[in-house]
Image: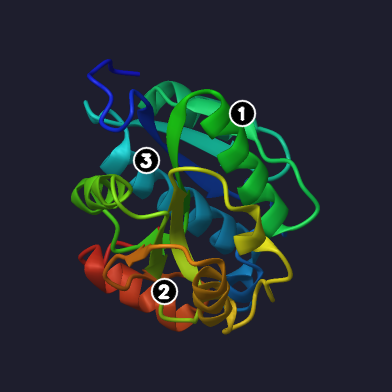
Amino acid sequence: MMASEPTLDGRRPVVAVFARTPLPGRVKTRLARDLGDDGALDTHLALLRDLLGALAGQPDFDVELWLSDGTTPEVDALGQQYRVAVRVQAGADLGQRMCRTIDTLLAANRLPLVVGSDVLGLDAAQIRKAFNALREADLVLAPVDDGGYGLIGMSRLHAAVFDAIPWGSDQVMAETRRRARRLGLRCFELEGCWDLDTIEDYLRWNAHRGGNPA
């Protein structure tokens, strides 16, 4: 963790990378239909390494890795390699887990963004843009192609943003926009990004990586 001046109201910015604990048969289950459980697991870990490599070690924000179901030796090694804290999510569904994580970080005088570990198209410049937007906005989002979002940030907790959202559907972003409007929140959206769920996404990802598979 590198020290620098905080950028908003005396709070240190932090990116909470949300990831499923890398266990065979528990990650990238749609992709596993084509690559098998081991191929899906390797892809999951490669995505995580790519994202941590792009974001960790920046001077103006910290990165933490938040896992769904506890840690593993592979994750502990990644935490040491990239010098990021490894923590565990809490909550019954994705909305509760993101809400509790944001609440925990805000209570620790941090300025939080939650980012999915399989989101592609986000880099340190985009992260800085999101943090800068929180100087004025109540809510920052990064839409993804499948109708969800890959990043969410708040300058203070708005728990209702997470209530009764159809997680896993193509209506997540649309319903979140409607919820933000009803709550009167000032919302800023980053340019669209995409995530990796299917074999088509996998091939697109490999093309971006220069044809180097996981």
In the rendered structure, the answer to whether residue 146 lies left or right of residue 207 reads: right
* Identity, as a three-letter code, of the amino acid under mark 3: Leu
- Quarter location, residue 191: bottom left
- Quarter location, residue 104: top right
Residue carrying label 3: 52
Mark 1 in CB contact with mark 2 (< 8 angstroms): no
Mark before the other along the chain sequence, 3 or 1: 3
Residue carrying label 2: 144
Describe the element under mark 1 as helix, strand or loop. Answer: helix
In the rendered structure, the answer to whether residue 126 lies left or right of residue 198 reads: left
Describe the element under mark 3 as helix, strand or loop. Answer: helix
Describe the element under mark 2 as helix, strand or loop. Answer: loop
Q: Residue furthest right?
A: 92
Tell us which disc is closer to us: 1 or 2: 2
Q: CA distance from mark 2 to mark 3?
A: 19 Å
Q: Residue at x 81, y 53 (%)?
A: 92
Looking at the image, residue 160 lies above or below residue 128:
below
